[in-house]
């Protein structure tokens, strides 16, 4: 087995119907992993490639996490890798934030990664990889994103806490913090060419991200190569946070 080998590993990817989740589902499957793709929209999970099974579910509505973990294990066996790519950013000005919209954001972005990880950990045995998705807003404040920023700050600390809890058993927990990538979530950013150009200019590399830029970091964190890396937030942002 090579350092970056994920062949025959069973992975779960949430938010797999579009954007980063869909792309990384295809990436893991192309490298030999057997992937269970999870999202609310069942039809959008079609066509993700060979070695991919789909599971349509509203993660924010799951109550029986142990039962859900059993359903995820049904296609290929107990998952050893979980990528938490599901997320929401409502982009509400602070006076318009309601209790319901706050809860909806924190539930999907922060609560779900913990409860789903906890349900999957027993089946991982002595080897597992948990990859959460943090954000530039885990450490930076952006306008009209107060609940999202709070949730992503929480994801960074949740990842460290999960590493403390489970890494002694061989299960690592790390986060990827993407910069600006073209997805449904960042659609309003890329719809404004001037704004997209300003973001690109703030990186050290001088461009916004392409989804393929996430492949290497993801394979690293999902493979034996990252055996001694845990509790870390890896910014894949072209150097945005370095400037």
Image: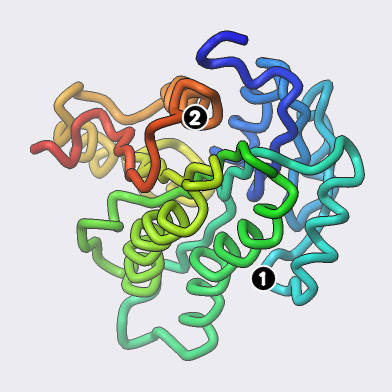
Q: In x, y percent, where is residue 196?
A: 29, 39
Determine the image quadrant of residue 125.
top right
Near-viewer residue (181 or 84): 84
Q: Is residue 36 left or right of residue 24?
A: right
Near-viewer residue (236 or 194): 236
Residue bearing the label numbered 2:
218
Near-viewer residue (64 or 45): 64
Number of other residues with Cα within 10 Å of mark 1, as a class: few under 14, some 14 to 19, many 20 or more: some
Determine the image quadrant of residue 50.
top right
Near-viewer residue (228 or 134): 228
- 101 relative to 218, above or below: below
Q: Earlier in the sequence, mark 2 or mark 1?
A: 1
Q: In x, y percent, where is residue 85?
A: 56, 48
Residue bearing the label numbered 1:
60
Q: In x, y percent, where is residue 52?
A: 81, 31
Number of other residues with Cα within 10 Å of mark 2, as a class: few under 14, some 14 to 19, many 20 or more: some
At a point 35% along the width and 50% down the height, the residue shown is 135
**Residue farthest right in this picture:** 74
**Residue farthest bottom in this picture:** 99
Evaluate whether residue 168 shows in this view.
yes
- Determine whether the residue tagged by mark 1 lies in a helix, strand or loop: helix
At a point 14% along the width and 26% down the height, the residue shown is 204
Name the mark nearer the viewer: 2 or 1: 2
- 51 relative to 143, above or below: above
Rounded to the nearest whole Å, what is the CA distance between mark 2 and mark 1? 24 Å
Q: Is residue 210 left or right of residue 33?
A: left
At a point 46% along the width and 21% down the height, the residue shown is 225
Evaluate whether residue 190 shows in this view.
no
């Amino acid at each position: 087995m090579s350092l970056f080998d994920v062949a025959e590993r069973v992975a779960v990817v949430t938010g797999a119907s579009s954007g980063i989740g869909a792309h990384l589902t295809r990436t893991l499957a192309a490298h030999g992993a057997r992937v269970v793709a999870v999202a609310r929209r069942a039809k959008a999970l079609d066509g993700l490639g060979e070695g991919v099974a789909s599971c349509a579910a509203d993660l924010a509505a799951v109550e029986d996490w142990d039962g859900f973990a059993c359903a995820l294990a049904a296609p290929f066996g107990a998952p050893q890798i979980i990528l938490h790519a599901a997320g929401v950013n409502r982009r509400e000005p602070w006076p318009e934030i309601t209790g319901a919209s706050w809860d909806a954001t924190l539930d999907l972005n922060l609560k779900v990664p913990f409860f789903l990880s906890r349900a999957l950990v027993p089946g991982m045995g002595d080897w597992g990889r948990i990859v959460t998705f943090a954000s530039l807003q885990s450490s930076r404040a952006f306008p009209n994103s107060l609940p999202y920023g709070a949730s992503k700050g929480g994801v960074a600390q949740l990842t460290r806490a999960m590493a403390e809890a489970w890494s002694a058993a061989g299960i690592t927990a790390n986060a990827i913090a993407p910069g600006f990538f073209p997805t449904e979530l960042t659609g309003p950013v890329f719809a404004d060419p001037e704004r997209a150009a300003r973001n690109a200019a703030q990186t050290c590399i001088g461009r916004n991200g392409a989804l393929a830029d996430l492949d290497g970091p993801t394979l690293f964190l999902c493979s034996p190569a990252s055996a001694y890396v845990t509790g870390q937030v890896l910014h894949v942002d072209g150097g945005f946070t370095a400037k």
